[in-house]
Amino acid sequence: MNQESKNAEKVGDMIRLMSAPNKKKVDVICLDCETPTEEFELLTQQTFYTGSRCDSCQEIYNIKIDEQASEDRLKRIQKRREESVDSVMREELGCPRDPNGYSSEGYNLSANRFDDNPTQKKLPQRLITMMSAKVNICLYSVPNEKKKENGRGVGKTRMALASMRHWLLSRPRVSFDKAHFIEAQTFTNMMHGKFPSEREPEIKEMAEKWFLVIDDIGYEKHDYIGDILLRRLNDGKPTFLTSNLSEQGFADKYGMRIYSRFCQIIEGKNNGVFIHLHGQDYRLTGGK
């Protein structure tokens, strides 16, 4: 076949790419000069292109998909998004600064066990499953003199932050401001110093967040946290709580009205769960 016939065949009308992933950008390689080219938008399973030319050899494209380059691109995109989420959590969503970051990776919870499921060892994965089902979660720990546990430093806040991070990463089309983190005592003190007309918009804003973490509940003197919880429970918006109150202590503090809504059974499934974390204070043991 002469060169003119080859060019005519390439132009045809279009070039067909077989087995292309659906609705993704991929990297491709020109088969004539082996030059890699980035970001071909593939819209259907069998995509066609009209006479685009390779920037290097200027031939009408005869190309193949570079799967490794495409995989590397996705990893770069994911890393950039993770960095963006971490920055927003730190600067805009009220999260405490953590020198170890907000990921659960590398954090050892294997020493902890759970009263309701002693065989469960992977807390982060368990929390992800419950969040997907829109379950209310309360991680709590209480002092235990026999085991020399002070009820602190077992990873409650760390797991709440990691769960919030996962929620944001898994929803790329959701605005970051749909999530927020508040520390119960700090938020309560801030609300108490305002006029009622100033409090209501902020309480309403927290009550309407799609994902809300309320850290260290139970020791605040005023009932603004209970107000937020009740509104969210009535609206079916799940909340992630951490506390040093036991489940009974939670019921005593916030009353059966909130407790029963938190734990109610809906269509055969728990609306909320209390997970008891055990373990030594990792802050006092060097993070081990």
Image: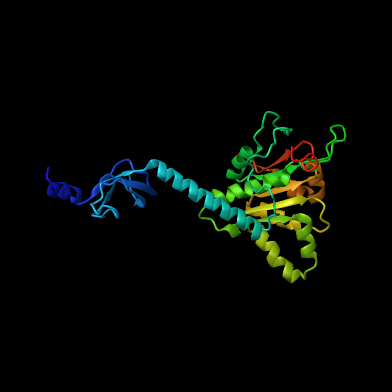
Q: Is residue 235 left or right of residue 153?
A: left
Could you say where residue 11 lies in the image, as x and y percent from the top left? 19, 51
Quadrant of the image for the N terminus? top left
Closer to the camera, 261 or 285?
285
Q: Is residue 185 visible?
A: yes
Quadrant of the image for the C terminus? top right
Q: Is residue 171 visible?
A: no
227 relative to 28, above or below? below
Residue at 65% x, 56% y: name it.
Answer: 90
Q: Is residue 273 left or right of residue 5?
A: right
- The image quarter containing residue 194 is bottom right
Residue at 61% x, 49% y: name it.
Answer: 165
172 relative to 247, above or below? below
Residue at 70% x, 54% y: name it.
Answer: 97
Closer to the camera, 256 or 115?
115
Q: Is residue 148 left or right of residue 51?
A: right
Could you say where residue 28 lies in the image, as x and y percent from the top left? 34, 47
